[in-house]
Image: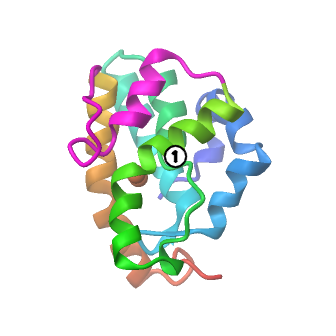
Amino acid sequence: MKNYYEDKTYIELVEDILNNKEFQKLKHYKHHGINRLTHSMNVSYHSYRITKFLKLNYKAAARAGLLHDFFLVNYQKINSKEKIKVLCKHPVYAFNNSKKNFDLSPIEENIILSHMFPLHLTLPKYVESIIVHLVDDFLPFYERFQSIVNKDARFSE
Ligand SMILES: [Fe+2]
Ligand SMILES: [Fe+2]
């Protein structure tokens, strides 16, 4: 996948998030076979490109795409019952962590809270929310594949 850091326009939109110490902790959490920081950047960058192409609010898509999984729960260390709870509730965890660290616009709030609809019952109210949701639904297939075929992409503790 492209090195997103080379896209200066994109990086300018999300730099403060990427430099945030709390947010950086995501790289220590396994997610779809890779780390949660890389997954978040994948979702953010692809959502950014699509929304920019469609002349939508690409800044909101880039920022909220990056923040959509901003939660520090280790799926490897919890039981199945807790996993289901986290799966349904993590949009709220991500929303709370994002609110604590950054200013969020109403679109960004909705993108984060609705990205697991219908598992979490916040409706996607904006086209940007639907796009981030779809990108987040489809990218994990590629990420899982990458974690199998590419040793460098694979999560390692
Ligand atoms: Fe998520
Ligand atoms: Fe995600």
* Image quarter of the C terminus: bottom right
Residue 62's x, y, as percent? 50, 32
Determine whether, in the image, residue 111 is placed left or right of residue 69: left
Reading the image, the residue beneath label 1 is: 93
* Image quadrant assignment for residue 120: top left
- Residue sitting at 52 percent across and 46 percent down? 93
Left/right of residue 98 with respect to residue 108 in the rendered view: right
Q: Nearer the viewer, residue 150 or 86?
A: 86
The part of the image, by quadrant, that contains residue 96 is top right
Asked if the beta carbon under badge 1 is closer than 8 A to the nearest atom of ligand 1, the reply is: no
Q: Main secondary structure of the magenta part?
A: loop
Residue 47 picture quarter: top left
Residue in the picture at 24% in, 49% down? 119
> Relative to 87, does residue 53 appear above or below in the rendering?
above
Judge whether 113 appears above or below 155 on screen. above
Question: In this rendering, is residue 137 above or below 61?
Answer: below
| Residue 74 is a magenta residue | no
Q: Badge 1, how many Cα within 10 Å: few under 14, some, many 20+?
A: some
Residue 68 location (% of width, % of height): 47, 43
**Residue 155 position within the rendered picture, expressed as x and y whole percent measured from the top left:** 55, 77
Is 122 magenta? The answer is yes
Which sits in the foreground, 7 or 58? 58
Residue type marked 1: Tyr
Furthest residue to the front? 81
Q: Secondary structure at mark 1?
A: helix
User: Which residue: 26% across, 32% down?
Assistant: 130
Where residue 136 sits: x, y (%)?
Answer: 34, 49
Q: Residue at x 26, y 37 (%)?
A: 121
Residue lying farthest to the left in this orientation: 118
Span of residues in magenta: 103-126
